[in-house]
Image: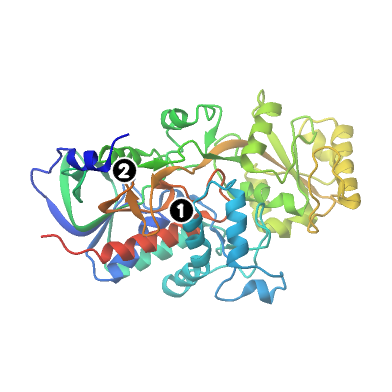
Amino acid sequence: MISSEAGAAGSTREKAAHWDEIWDIVVVGSGFAGLAAAAEAADRGAKVVVLEKMSGYGGNSVISHGEYAAWDDVYHLREKLGLGMDSAALHEEDTLRGGNFYGHPELIRLLVKQAPSALKWLIDKGGAKIRENVLPSPGHSAPRIHTGIGGSGALFAAALKKMAEQNGATVRTNEKVTRIWRSSFSSPVTGVEVQRGKKRVNIAVRQALILASGGFGRDLAMRQAYNPAVGPEYHSTNHPGATGEMILLARTIGADVTQMNFIQIFPFADPVTGKFDVPSVFALRGPVAGMIYVDPAGRRFVNELADGNSCARAQIRVGRDQKLTYALFNQTMISRMGTQDEVETGLNAGRFARGETLTELAQFLQMIPEVLTRTVSAHNRFIREGRDLEFGKENPVQMMPMEAGPFYALPQWPAVHHTLGGLRINTRAQVMDIWGNSIPHLYAAGEVTGGIHGEKRLPGNSIPECLIFGRIAGTNAAEEKLSA
């Protein structure tokens, strides 16, 4: 075992020859976490720049669907809607259990405790607007999913960007960080090297560097290095820039990583593009309303309330040849999952199929109508009798039988959605080194980090995680003493 003293004696022997720019705080990544960090740091008087390698800001945040898990909100919607009791303790318990108890309890406690206040901050300071409902979701024992108006994370990201820029932060695109400067394993981070067009420039930090660059869902080699099972047969819902190089760069200066093999698969992506689009959200929300998943022949193949990875493995088993399975629901369930307008838009785009009867829908999907009819009848009987003889699914009171049309089918196939491992951080959002010490002047937040969600991430927990730990990172970074 290498001692911390040995590590401190070692040296990265990396030092910038000169500085082209000097900022108090540099934030790498312009998604929820990076913009939240920039907004808080700039609000405290720091001179902040956000560096984004892509041509547009927002990363995965702008293509997310704005689902935010919180046990309360500024409007107290759960109470007004008569949705029963919820609490930080219950949210914490669900998150620990949902991650198979691999999540770090202290980090989870921060996440759930501050989720309502971070949402209030986004609404009050950023002008974000949420729908007047609170939805149930798999893994959550109480309805606590808040959604942005329009069902898009882009609106939340825009609110955060406005906050950051109004507070004085600068957001730059097309600037890729290629190196982190740190002169030894006992010294602070001093800056970054950046690819700017054909030039390499060095940017110094006087207070801190904050990494909020996202995960590595789009990097097949990096995925398979930690989890060989997540191969090329899986699409990715992530934007093209989710390639994880900042994790690798941080490791070169001594940063530790954790739980890199935990990769969340989203079973409901578009089978053609791999995108996590609005119809995909219906398949995520639908099982608690009574939705079923069927194979290309029209038969159920999994407990629809199982976690995403289990559903995905079942899909691979039954649909490998066609790379296709379906989510099935009827008209009465739509209000539990989204809006009729979203369904009509999906129909026009070819993402939903509709039949006035199950026979009509089965014929359109090239299934034997009697097979699909038997499948739906058996599930309806389970809901009425409370016994799922096929897959042992629990029968929540929210489930409805599919007895009247129109009926809908959503084509779906699994895709990598979230890489749950990453840089190890503490409760101050400081990056830890391989000897268990915090690296001076280095912070991280969002999907670039690991150890919060555990083996699986509950729906809606990602956005509050990004906001909360982004705010923590920005606040603490701004409190660092200015270097000379």
SS label for mark 1: helix
Q: Give residue 258's position: percent from left, percent from top.
A: 43, 42
Q: Seen from this angle, which residue lies furthest left?
A: 18
Look at label 2 and name its amino acid. Trp
Give the mark, 1 or 2, whose residue is nearer the N terminus: 1
- For the residues carrying marks 1 and 2, which lies nearer the camera in this image? 2
Is 56 located above or below residue 41 in the figure? above
Residue with the mark numbered 2:
435
Is 241 located above or below residue 437 in the figure? above
Residue with the mark numbered 1:
62
Look at label 1 and name its amino acid. Val
Q: Give residue 141's position: percent from left, percent from top.
A: 68, 59
Is 373 located above or below residue 66 in the figure? above
SS label for mark 2: loop
Quarter of the rendering containing residue 298:
top right
Which residue is depicted at the point 41% across and 31% down? 222
Q: Seen from this angle, which residue lies furthest top?
A: 321
Which of the labelled discs sits on residue 271, or is there none?
none
Which residue is depicted at the point 31% across and 39% down? 251
Q: Give residue 183's position: percent from left, percent from top.
A: 15, 44
In the image: residue 336, left or right of residue 106: right
Q: Quadrant of the C terminus?
A: bottom left
Mark 1 crowd level (few <14, some 14–19, many ≥20, 10 Å Cα): many
Q: Give residue 9's position: percent from left, percent from top.
A: 17, 40
Which residue is depicted at the point 42% across and 33% down? 219
Q: Quadrant of the N terminus?
A: top left
